[in-house]
Image: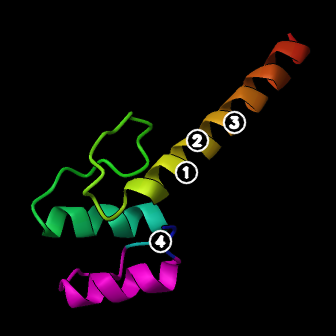
Amino acid sequence: MVMLLEEIKSIAEQKGVAMQNLRTKKDFIHAIQNAEGNQQCYGLGNECNNDDCCWHSDCMKHNHENRKIGKRKRKKVKKHL
């Protein structure tokens, strides 16, 4: 399940996360993971088998999209060389 930023902000507020310096979805999720005592691993591109994590499906989608963007950037760099 992919969560919207507003939903994530609500969770952060419930967890007592200080939100003033958080800008991105990834920032908010890392702060929540930290507040819960978990590893701040969301969106770092790691393969993950932790299906119990509430961010798992969103994280895997985020990682997949970032890999596609990275491949396009590498192709553009090769064209210019």
Q: Viewer-proximal residue, 37 or 24? A: 37
Would residue 81 be found to the left or right of residue 52 on screen?
Answer: right
Q: How far is disc 3 from disc 2 in space, using C-alphas?
A: 6 Å
Where does residue 74 sit, x and y in percent of width and height?
73, 22
Earlier residue among tags 4 and 3: 4
Whether pointer 3 and pointer 2 mark residues with C-beta atoms closer than 8 Å, the reply is yes
The residue under label 1 is 61
Residue position for label 3: 68
Tell me: 24 left or right of 19: right
Query: Which mark is on residue 53?
Result: none
Residue at the disc numbered 2: 64
Percent from the top left, x then y, of residue 42? 36, 52
Tell me how far mark 3 sits from mark 1, CA to CA: 11 Å
Q: Are marks 1 and 2 in contact (CB under 8 Å)?
A: yes
Under mark 2, the amino acid is His
Q: Earlier in the sequence, mark 1 or mark 4?
A: 4
How far apart marks 1 and 2 lie (CA) works out to 5 Å
- Residue type for callout 3: Lys
> Which stretch is magenta?
4-21
CA–CA distance in space, label 1 to label 4: 20 Å
Residue corresponding to mark 4: 23
